[in-house]
Amino acid sequence: MPQAGAADTGSQMQTPPMISGDSYPTEVGSEARSNYLSGGVGFQTAYYDNMIGASTAKPVSDISYTINPTVSFNQSTARQRTAFSYNPGFIFYQPTSELNTVNQNATGNYQYRLTPHLTIGANESFQKSSNIFSETDGYLEGSVPGSAQPQGVVAPFANMISNTTSGQMSYQFSRDSMIGAGGSYARQSYPDQSEAAGLSNSSSSSGSFYYNRRLGSSQYCGLRYQYARSLDTLPVLGQSTTQTQAFTPFYSIFFTRTFSLSFSGGPQYVNTVEPAPFGKYVSWVPSASAGIGWQGMRTSFSAGYGRSVSELPGLFGAQVSTNANATARWLVTRNWSLGANGNYQVQKSAGPSILVGSGSGHTVSGAISAGRAINEHLQLGFGYDRMHQSYGNISTIASVPNSDQAYVSLSYRFTRPLGR
């Protein structure tokens, strides 16, 4: 099964990550594996110097204790690939014990090759979280999108539920030509709106179609069309509906099997209907994106840039989002690893009027981490995460614009190989 970032090895074409929706891996080449069953449990202690609990009106310092059981499954054959992971988190705070909670995080991915040139796939993810740093694991494992994606706005310690379902297919109808299509549905909500004052519940659906043409053995170009519809709901304002259509030519080059670069850009049509008295807004805006991914035996790096109009989780109404991110990882020795990532994004209301609570502003976030393998099963992790959110019209964030944590973690993991 072809992987994101792989170069051609024959007549079978690849799909650039920017177009396929695949991600650049962050693990280094020596860690890449498949056909395994893995499980374990982690313990993490974190210190926060700027958080708000239900019983206090001003930021306080706090310590959390987290227990993270985990199980994952990955199996690949000549025709299919299946991956699943489940990672709940039991978090206890001291002294702000009213924030004690149980988080949930589950993902599933499936791909099946119906014929040598026709592949279908499906993806599902679910998350229940109440901590802005819930996904920190100390090792920066996982993946990042093929181009920078806006992350929306997060209430630092409010309960939030999100769910995303997507599917895709690709068909190579000649040696150097391929078509593909995909669709997705996503929903994010805050069960207790009082914990996230000023942030909206949102849902969105999208569909896309692309034509991919191979130029030589390592270059691709083509055209992608994408339609998206989103709905935001905020009790004090009502509902906002945004529809976008984008026509974006793209170009990708695979310098090596694990090193690729992609560009995309074109016009985007925006149709937004806001509650009275603002009404309807229609416009054409430019959109652009770029992505680079490199995976070596001991290091990996990926970065992306994007600009487009879209619905962003937590923000009310359509936003013009400009964002950039980067992730790097280095396996210093057999037992020590270092990692870092950063993200910067700016949001501005896409309409002519800025609604109260629309939340135009910017976000800056970053993280550094270190991991030490004590033995085959035990790992020790250290790290620091920080996020700054500046959205003056959102009271939940205005009261705590800066969130950070320093943590130490200890995890036990086992892996069992699976037969092909």
Image (tube, rainbow, N blue to C red):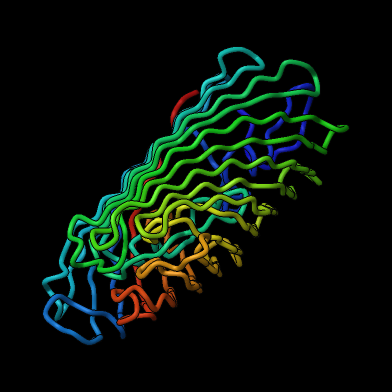
**Is residue 329 something one can see in this rendering?**
no
Q: Nearer the viewer, residue 136 or 280?
A: 280
The reply to whether residue 1 is visible in this rendering is yes
345 displayed left or right of 266: left
Horizontally, residue 274 falls left or right of residue 200, namely right
Q: Residue 21 location, x and y as percent?
A: 57, 40
- Quarter of the image that includes the N terminus: top right
Residue 317: which quarter of the image?
A: bottom left
Residue positioned 20% across, 62% down in the render: 193
Q: List x then y, in percent, for residue 70.
A: 31, 48
Count of marks, rendered view: 0
Task: Give the vertical position of 379 relative to 10 (above or below).
Answer: below
Residue at image coords 50%, 64%: 349
* For residue 417, side relative to residue 413 (left or right): right
Q: Nearer the viewer, residue 77 or 279?
A: 279
Residue drawn at 46 percent across, 47 percent down = 242
Question: In the rendered image of this protein, does residue 214 appear above or below residue 255?
Answer: above
Residue furthest out toward the front: 277
The location of residue 358, given as percent across then percent down, is 40, 66
- Seen at 36% across and 65% down, the residue is 154
Residue 342 placement (x, y as % from top left): 55, 69
Q: Residue lying farthest top?
A: 115
The one of 91 and 122 positioned closer to us in this rendering? 122
Q: Is residue 74 above or below residue 254?
A: above
